[in-house]
Amino acid sequence: MNNTTLTTSALVELDKQHFTHPWTVFDVYQQQGALPIAEAKGCYITDSNGKRYLDAVGGLWCTNIGLGRTEMADAIAEQCRQMAFANPFVDMTNIPATQLAAKLAELAPGDLNHTIFTCGGSTAVDSSYRLIQYYQNCRGKHDKKHIISRNNSYHGSTYLSMSIGGKAGDHPVEFDFISDFIHHISCPNFYRAAAGMSEAEYLQQLLDELEQKILTIGPDKVAAFYAEPIFGAGGVIVPPAGYHQATWAICKKYDVLYVSDEVVTSFGRLGHWFASWDVFGIKPDIITTAKGITSGYQPLGACIYSDRIHQVISEPGHGRCFAHGFTYSGHPVACAAALKNIEIIEREQLLQRVLDIGPYFQQQMKTLQDLPIVGQVRGQQLMVCVENVRDKVSKSLFDEELDIGKRIADHAEDLGLIVRPIVHLNVMSPPLTITKDEVDFIVRTLRQAIERTINDLQQQGHLPTPAQQKTA
Ligand code: PLP
């Protein structure tokens, strides 16, 4: 079947019949279908009817160098021609995978010199936990297997990684989750802290909670703390200053491994290869990454871990076998794409570019806070979230059925801008190549989309009209 022969409506129908999309709300999807994307170049995507959009989401936090680069296509094609696959198990390797593992050791902080390659972020998180179990058993600490993670975090959608995640909306009753060894503590969101609390008091409360949780479970039972440096899908929540270093110190105190899930925050999104050390001053024991590692040109993930862990698991004389990995671990084509991606980021100095344009993006986005339903605009560098609220003083939310984020995203889409709705939020993470003019377009268009949404809500009686406000 040639997709160029299909009309858009036929394509949408076929899609409805056969493609079960991630996070499909079946009823809505049956009515609306999906938007077929046919082409992509830089920050722009074009649908099958030829309409062009600025994709401020960067695919799904991933198109860091921008799409449609011939140089990337050539590198991928060349690797396919030369050697599209080599068995990664023990007795064989391949040149791009070796080179990439060495490059990651150079770019990652501290003594994170070893990489387990995976097919994406979820499997990187799964692999990190298998590594942790193995490490603890090698040390004879057979009970030290519990995980602490945070409410509202997202770590992937395999059984384990979704159970580590703490987003209530991702834990519907129809699914089952691991609960016997995974524990969740509060999300460090100062915007939602109790009224009247200072940021310092709030931080102390969060730190006490983590320490208390470790003590309650028992330090001899807690293996690892999982944390995204900045929450991604949870709504771009930047924890209070000092949170990362203090939680890291608590972990070290109790021999708890710190896993920094940098699937979103690495490869330039915050202006550095990795955010853990360069932005937040911590050297985790394990970093998980994916997405921006290839800028979305190929599926790839990595679990990068420390010399300390490696020395324990590979200690000579035990005949140990790390029986974990995938057919596609270190896939040569994906690794060749990652190497080319890193080369482009270095050559075009895209990390510095983010440090230059990021503050402008944040500052311009914050101008939306004058809108009556924008409770907070937050973020750092090229990660941003607009939190929409019914009432800015009480910070109360709209009813979930109103799907406020989706309404705004739909208006933006009509106006040629893609922003991601997550219930009452709209999040953005544009390619690192975004220009000032494109930032201005995003802010101007999103303002218009929010104004249209407010107007709809007023017409439908969900918000008072200006006339009603006057007489009230
Ligand atoms: N970890 C974090 C922080 C993520 O944001 C994501 C995906 O958005 C994942 C893990 C899962 O990655 P993937 O979808 O590639 O499996």
Image (cartoon, rainbow, N blue to C red):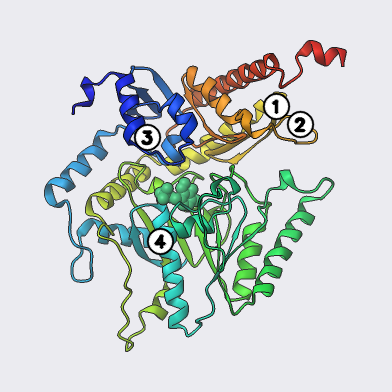
Label 2: state its secondary structure. loop
Residue receiving disc 4? 303
Give the mark nearest the N terminus, 3 or 1.
3
Q: Residues within 10 Å of mark 4 (few under 14, many from 20)?
A: many
Task: Residue type at mark 1: give it.
Answer: Ile
Image quarter where the N terminus lies is top left
Q: Is residue 63 left or right of residue 363?
A: left
Numbered circle sitting on residue 66:
3
Label 3: state its secondary structure. loop
Task: Residue type at mark 4: give it.
Answer: Cys
Give the mark nearest the N terminus, 3 or 2.
3
- What is the distance, in whole Å, between disc 1 and disc 4 at their CAs? 40 Å
Residue receiving disc 1? 373
- What is the distance, in whole Å, between disc 3 and disc 1 at their CAs? 32 Å
Give the mark nearest the N terminus, 1 or 2.
1
- What is the distance, in whole Å, between disc 3 and disc 2 at their CAs? 36 Å
Callouts 1 and 2 close, C-beta under 8 Å: yes
Q: Residues within 10 Å of mark 2 (few under 14, many from 20)?
A: some
**Foreground: disc 4 or disc 2:** 2
